[in-house]
Amino acid sequence: MEVSARNSLKGTVKHIVEGAVNTEVVLEIAPGVEVVAIITKSSAEKLGLKEGKQAYAVVKATDVMVAVD
Amino acid sequence: MEVSARNSLKGTVKHIVEGAVNTEVVLEIAPGVEVVAIITKSSAEKLGLKEGKQAYAVVKATDVMVAVD
Amino acid sequence: MEVSARNSLKGTVKHIVEGAVNTEVVLEIAPGVEVVAIITKSSAEKLGLKEGKQAYAVVKATDVMVAVD
Amino acid sequence: MEVSARNSLKGTVKHIVEGAVNTEVVLEIAPGVEVVAIITKSSAEKLGLKEGKQAYAVVKATDVMVAVD
Amino acid sequence: MEVSARNSLKGTVKHIVEGAVNTEVVLEIAPGVEVVAIITKSSAEKLGLKEGKQAYAVVKATDVMVAVD
Amino acid sequence: MEVSARNSLKGTVKHIVEGAVNTEVVLEIAPGVEVVAIITKSSAEKLGLKEGKQAYAVVKATDVMVAVD
């Protein structure tokens, strides 16, 4: 399935923290560059996420803000 | 100002496409790894965004989805 | 690619309204039940959307609100 | 109250899973077509949601992505 | 219609900027406290928004970030 | 850090409800005008949020809906 979200960043699952309803997934998308996702526990199970597995961080362009120092 | 969004990815403005209301900003956050943001034109002007400028892609963890092949 | 978003509603493209930056896509997901998506023009082109084409409305569960009369 | 969100899909509450902070609500918006919403527990209580009750799945058009096979 | 979004801030329409697809609406929710909304042009027309009209800024709690200096 | 989000409403932390994964933060942004934010517990700790502390409710304009009676 190809999704309209403009950002699809290839990475590796580095860390998973399972909560009651939500699960926190840390993806390494480049050496030392991590992205944190919070998805539902059932979605994490459906995708079979495990540390070391290849996965994508998918983000709509309108959900990305820009900041400057 | 420090924001609660979990993801604050440091990068460089690589490309800016200005629209009537929105502006598309492409940030390079690692060699060959780009993030596309769509923000309002007035925000882009307020932040003084220019190609080559250092900026951050800021994304809430709940706005990041995970996908697998 | 399988995405963590909980809602993936199969439908047919019924109507497309192309704007300068954004494109409005109307999907029929059941007889008389339509969902409106606004995605970037480039995403709509990338996906090759045309009226009559099969497509999915993908929505994160946390982006769905509930209302009552 | 009438809200600016473009999608207001009429349905019936089919299933409710209450969590500590969040509640998962499954709405049937057409025969066999379900939408999952995750809202705060207090909102679910405020709306008096119960299985069988009529409710709407409300989604902003910019929160709907489109996908193709 | 009562919506599950936790924030429903009563205010007055102070300013409207109509774009090709989107419309920017500035609401004054307390003396000197303004909230900017960007909604689709058709939604703004559907709601009959005009300067001076009473309206609510509706925001899901999960869409509100917190920042500190 | 200056963020592209259009709404940055100055207020005071009035109430904090800590959950397992998420924390609910109530900010008073004007006399009697409150905004509820749900952020991750770790973000709330990182920002050192306490009742009485000055903080901002930060919301993207595209995440603000408008409603009328």
Image: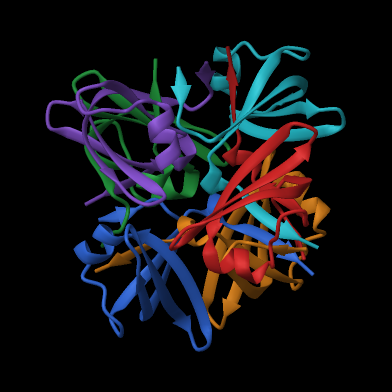
Chain colours: A purple, B green, C cyan, D red, E orange, F blue
Q: Residue B6, image x and y in percent?
A: 28, 49
Give the position of the C terminus of chain C as an image quadrant: bottom right
Compared to residue D13, the image places residue C18 above or below, namely above
Compared to residue A1, the image places residue E20 above or below, namely below
* Quadrant hosting residue C16: top right
Q: At 29% from the left edge and 61% from the top edge, which residue is drawn?
A: F41
* Quadrant hosting residue D42: bottom right
Q: Residue E29, image x and y in percent?
A: 59, 76
Q: Nearer the viewer, residue C23 or C61?
A: C61
Q: At 33% from the left edge and 50% from the top edge, which residue is drawn?
A: A19
Q: Please say whether residue D43 is visible from this viewpoint.
A: yes
Compared to residue C53, the image places residue F41 above or below, namely below
Give the position of the N terminus of chain C as an image quadrant: top left
Q: Residue E31, image x and y in percent?
A: 56, 83
Q: At 58% from the left edge and 11% from the top edge, which residue is drawn?
A: D69
Answer left or right for C1 relative to C46.
left
